[in-house]
Image (cartoon, helix red, strand yellow):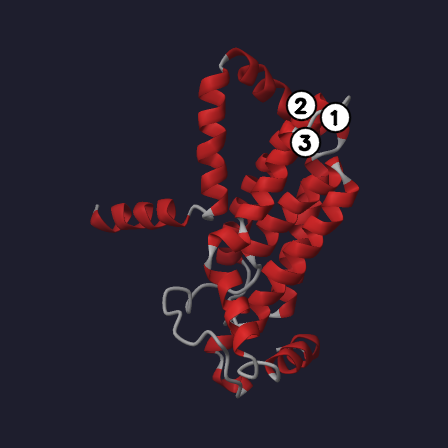
Amino acid sequence: MNAFDSSIIHFLNQFAFRSVFIDRAALAMTQFYMLRGLPMIALLWWVWFRDGPDKLRDREIVVTTIVAALCVLALGRFLAHWVPFRIRPFANPELGLRFLVSSEDRIRTWNAFPSDHAMLWCAVATGVLVASWRIGIFALAYAFLFICMSRVYVGLHHPTDVLGGAALGVGMCLLLNLTRCRHFIAAPVLQFSRRHQSLFHVGMFLLSFGLVTHFDELLMLGSSLLKSI
């Protein structure tokens, strides 16, 4: 482990098990969808439905941000398989530390880098920032301080896991939200939304639900089906 990660992890770990409230709050941020993804998706839908002279631009941003979120999830899965494996802090006995998370057997063998949560929610927060810098600053602060850093605090990730994931998420969203890219991505989707409003909103609801839950149940179902074949 590099000195940067080690110093921050050791600094944060000294506060673990000292406050029941802080410990439970940090664990809740890593476990409950309603604290993690739901506020971010709610802000994205606020951008979609808010009135104003830039309503078309707002909706283009929402569509493009969702596409960026899906892209970073796919990129995260790809990188996790192809970059050198990195053990998670809670599973690393060489650190000699005790973390709040200690028995996550399901992810013990998953690559810690990059943090797909950091990638996803920083991408969504960046989309909100592109639409409204005031609300977007709040969204980015919430994503980084509460969603990302809580995962470092409990031992799920190293600081560079979340920093790298955040940079990839922000970069992907900003890239796709360049004016020409945004028009190209959003135009056919918005045209479909005008022609088939009911079908479009049902699809967006299901997609939003999938993002909030990180597609966990769908991935578990797909994994079970593959194992049974």
Residue in view at x 61 percent, y 84 percent: 14
Percent x, y of residue 183: 70, 23
Mark 2 Cα-neighbour bin, 10 Å: few <14, some 14–19, many ≥20: some
Quadrant including the N terminus: bottom right
Cβ atoms under marks 3 and 1 closer than 8 Å: no
Please tell me which residue lies in front, 204 or 188: 204
Numbered disc in front, either 3 or 2 = 3
Residue 19 found in image quarter: bottom right
Pointer 1 residue = 180
Q: Seen from this angle, which residue lies furthest bottom?
A: 96
Residue 24: percent from left, percent from top: 50, 71
Q: Are marks 3 and 2 in contact (CB under 8 Å)?
A: no
Depicted 80 relative to depicted 90: above or below: above
The foreground one among 45 and 106 is 45
Residue at image x 41%, y 67%? 109
Cα–Cα gap, marks 3 and 1: 12 Å
**Residue named by callout 3:** 61
Query: How many numbered badges does the structure rendering display?
Result: 3
Percent of width and height locating residue 165 = 62, 56
| Structural crowding at the residue carrying mark 3, measured as other residues with C-alpha within 10 Å and reported as few (<14), some (14–19) or many (≥20) | many
Picture layout, residue 174 above or below residue 55: below
Q: Compared with residue 40, is residue 62 higher up or lower down, i.e. above or below?
A: above
Report the mark closest to the observer, 3 or 1: 3
The mark found on residue 184 in the picture is: 2
Element under label 3? Answer: helix
Q: Amino acid at mark 1?
A: Arg
Q: Are marks 1 and 2 in contact (CB under 8 Å)?
A: yes
